[in-house]
Image (cartoon, rainbow, N blue to C red):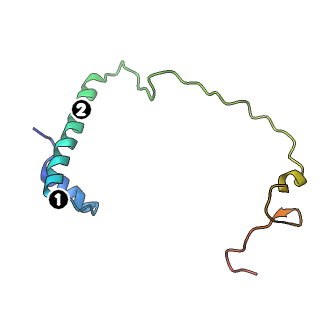
Amino acid sequence: MSTISRDEVARVAALARIDLRPDEVARLAGELGVIVESVARVSEVATADVPATSHPLPLTNVFRDDVPEPALPIQDVLAGAPQQENGRFAVPQILGEE
């Protein structure tokens, strides 16, 4: 028997402003009940001597070291810009300010 009733599904759907048909409420009640039962079964197995994990395999950071380097020359940076003005990118005005 499902631990989630049709009334609970309908109430939560109404709170979330989700319009569900009666057949959808019945289907979701069953599906949510299966999910709740599955979580309960996993909770039964998890004991204090089993460490929590976020991934089944150990992961390590593969990024390179962050080493500061000299900045690019302004001419190189602006070489691909569609428009430039006074050594800066020129972009369309969006706020209507002068």
Could you classify mark 1 by the number of other residues whose Cα lies within 10 Å: few (under 14), some (14-19), or many (20 or more)?
few
Numbered label tally: 2
User: Closer to the N terminus: mark 1 or mark 2?
Assistant: 1
Q: Nearer the viewer, mark 1 or mark 2?
A: 1
Q: Are marks 1 and 2 in contact (CB under 8 Å)?
A: no
Residue 31 in the image, given as x and y percentages of width and height: 20, 42
Q: Amino acid at mark 2?
A: Ser
Which quarter of the rendered picture does the C terminus lie within?
bottom right
Residue 60 in the image, given as x and y percentages of width and height: 59, 24
Residue 68 in the image, given as x and y percentages of width and height: 81, 38
Which quarter of the rendered picture does the N terminus lie within?
top left
Q: Report the residue at 90% width, 50% height from top.
A: 73
Could you classify mark 2 by the number of other residues whose Cα lies within 10 Å: few (under 14), some (14-19), or many (20 or more)?
few
Describe residue 98's horizontal placement relative to residue 60 as left or right.
right
Residue 13 in the image, given as x and y percentages of width and height: 23, 58
What kind of element bears circle 1?
A: loop
What kind of element bears circle 2?
A: helix
Q: Report the residue at 75% width, 35% height from top.
A: 66
Describe residue 35's horizontal placement relative to residue 52 as left or right.
left
Q: Which residue is mark 2?
A: 38
Q: Amino acid at mark 1?
A: Arg
Q: Report the residue at 45% width, 29% height from top.
A: 54
Q: Which residue is mark 1?
A: 21
43, above or below 50, in the image: below
Q: Outermost residue toward the left?
A: 1
Give how far apart the Cα atoms at labels 1 and 2 are. 26 Å
Q: Outermost residue toward the top?
A: 49
